[in-house]
Each structure stands twice: as structure tokens, then as C-alpha cells.
């Protein structure tokens, strides 16, 4: 089932990230997650570019075993946190409409844990008896 969501750019980016671990599923769940990831990322592409740039500027590099930077992280304890939040504040409230695909609860029961289902509960259809 396809439904329209009205969400902030920050929410869309977070939702796009939340479905990624389930994209390898070979059934309806994987298809819906991959589709939703693409639709959500497309809807907030500019926001993601701005966020990633601010993260790189104000965050801390994540170093792998070969001493290579493999990503960036930031949190309230980080030195650049306030500057990062100030940079992102004008963009966090911008909204978008996204058509997402939902899946029946029967598609996730037995495939993912309850804890995992909490990350994608926005795309799981509630069905009586499920």
C-alpha cells in the first residue's frame, strides 16, 4: 500500500537511514525498504548534503583499523555540537511530502526482532489480530 507522509527534512533523512539494514531482505520487506529509502533520500537530498557538510566541518572523524577516516560523528558531548546545531537549525524544520510503501505486519513478524521493528514502525500496517 502506498501512503503519503508529511515530514520534516530531518525526519525524512532519519527514516531513510532506518530502512537501510532491511534492504537486503529478498521479499516484500526488502523491496519496500529499498523503495522507501530512495523516495525519502530524494525528498531531502539537499538537506542531506548540508547536514553531511556540517558534520564533516564540526564533527569528529571515525578512523578504521588502517587509520583511514571512514565517516564522521557528532553528539552533544562533541566540541562542535553547538555550531553544528546552529548550522542545521534553519533546515531542520523544512518539510516535504513523501509517498512511502507500507507492508503488512505479517511481512515483518519472524523476519526481524521487535526492537528492529520499532525503527520502521512508520511503514508497518497495523492489522487486526497481528
Image (cartoon, rainbow, N blue to C red):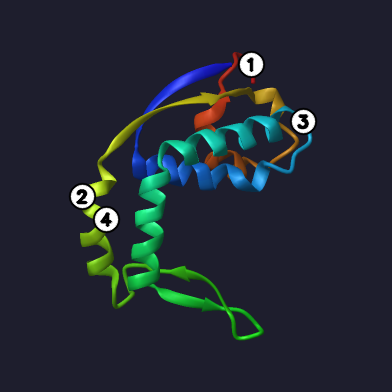
Measure the C-alpha gap from mark 2 to mark 1: 43 Å
Mark 2 Cα shell of 10 Å, populated few (<14), some (14-19), many (≥20): few
Q: Are marks 4 and 2 in contact (CB under 8 Å)?
A: yes
Query: 89 or 114: nearer the eye?
Result: 89
State the residue position of label 1.
Answer: 129
First along the sequence among labels 1 and 4: 4
Visible residue check, residue 108: no
Measure the C-alpha gap from mark 3 to mark 4: 37 Å
Could you tell me residue 59's position as x and y percent? 38, 72
Q: Nearer the viewer, mark 1 or mark 4?
A: 4
x 60%, y 86%: residue: 67
x 42%, y 44%: residue: 45
SS of the residue at dot 1? loop
First along the sequence among labels 3 and 1: 3
First along the sequence among labels 3 and 4: 3
Could you tell me residue 77's position as x and y percent? 33, 74
SS of the residue at dot 4? helix
State the residue position of label 2.
Answer: 90
Amino acid at each position: 500500500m502506498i501512503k503519503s507522509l508529511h515530514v520534516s527534512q530531518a525526519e525524512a533523512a532519519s527514516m531513510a537511514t532506518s530502512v537501510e539494514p532491511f534492504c537486503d531482505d529478498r521479499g516484500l520487506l526488502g523491496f519496500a525498504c529499498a523503495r522507501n529509502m530512495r523516495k525519502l533520500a530524494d525528498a531531502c537530498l539537499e538537506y542531506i548534503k548540508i547536514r553531511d557538510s556540517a558534520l564533516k566541518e564540526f564533527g569528529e572523524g571515525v578512523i578504521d583499523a588502517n587509520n583511514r577516516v571512514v565517516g564522521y560523528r557528532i553528539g552533544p558531548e562533541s566540541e562542535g555540537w553547538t555550531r553544528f546545531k546552529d548550522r542545521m537549525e534553519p533546515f531542520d524544520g523544512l518539510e516535504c511530502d513523501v509517498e512511502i510503501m507500507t507492508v503488512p505486519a505479517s511481512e515483518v513478524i519472524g523476519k526481524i526482532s521487535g526492537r528492529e521493528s520499532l525503527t520502521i514502525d512508520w511503514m508497518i500496517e497495523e492489522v487486526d489480530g497481528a
